[in-house]
Amino acid sequence: MVDEAVRTALRRLVDERDWAQFHTPASLARSVVIEAGELLECFQWSDQGDPDAVRDELADVLTYCLLLADKLELDPDAIVLSKLESTQRKYPIDKARGRSTKYDRLPD
């Protein structure tokens, strides 16, 4: 999913500017939420957000997510695939298909 060239470019950007000193896990997690709020703001008055603004804000969210994963020495691909496996178990197709019901409220 995440190309190594992207991760290398992010690390280089941070290293060249000496920003790693500011990148604690907590500060990066806060930045994810802040940028997610800015992404949501693109849709504040319309379900059709401005495509350029959405693209830029989504890039910011993804950037901070990748920086946080890197800081925690987590492989983004591995953690997403692991979470997908967990979600597949919690939401079996025969019970969850076409429903938005939380897993603990799905029919038996």
Image (tube, grey):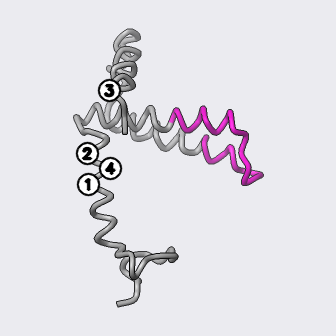
Magenta region's main secondary structure?
A: helix
Name the amino acid type tagged 2. Answer: Ala
- Specify the label residue 4 is tagged with: 3
In the picture of the structure, the residue carrying the numbered disc 4 is 80
Outermost residue, left direction?
73
Residue 9, image x, y percentages: 39, 19
Compared across the picture, whether 8 is left or right of 30 comes to: left
- Any magenta on residue 90? no
- C-alpha gap between disc 1 and disc 2: 6 Å
Quadrant location, the N terminus:
top left
Asked if marks 1 and 4 touch (Cβ < 8 Å), the reply is yes
In the picture of the structure, the residue carrying the numbered disc 1 is 82
- Specify the label residue 53 is tagged with: none
- C-alpha gap between disc 1 and disc 4: 5 Å
Q: How many marks?
A: 4
Look at 40% across and 40% down and name the residue there. Answer: 29
The disc, 3 or 4, on the residue closer to the chain's N-terminal end is 3
**Secondary structure at numbered mark 3:** helix
Magenta segment boundaries in residue numbering = 38-60
Name the amino acid type tagged 3. Answer: Glu
Asked if marks 2 and 4 touch (Cβ < 8 Å), the reply is yes
In the picture of the structure, the residue carrying the numbered disc 2 is 78
Q: Give the quarter of the image for residue 36.
A: top right
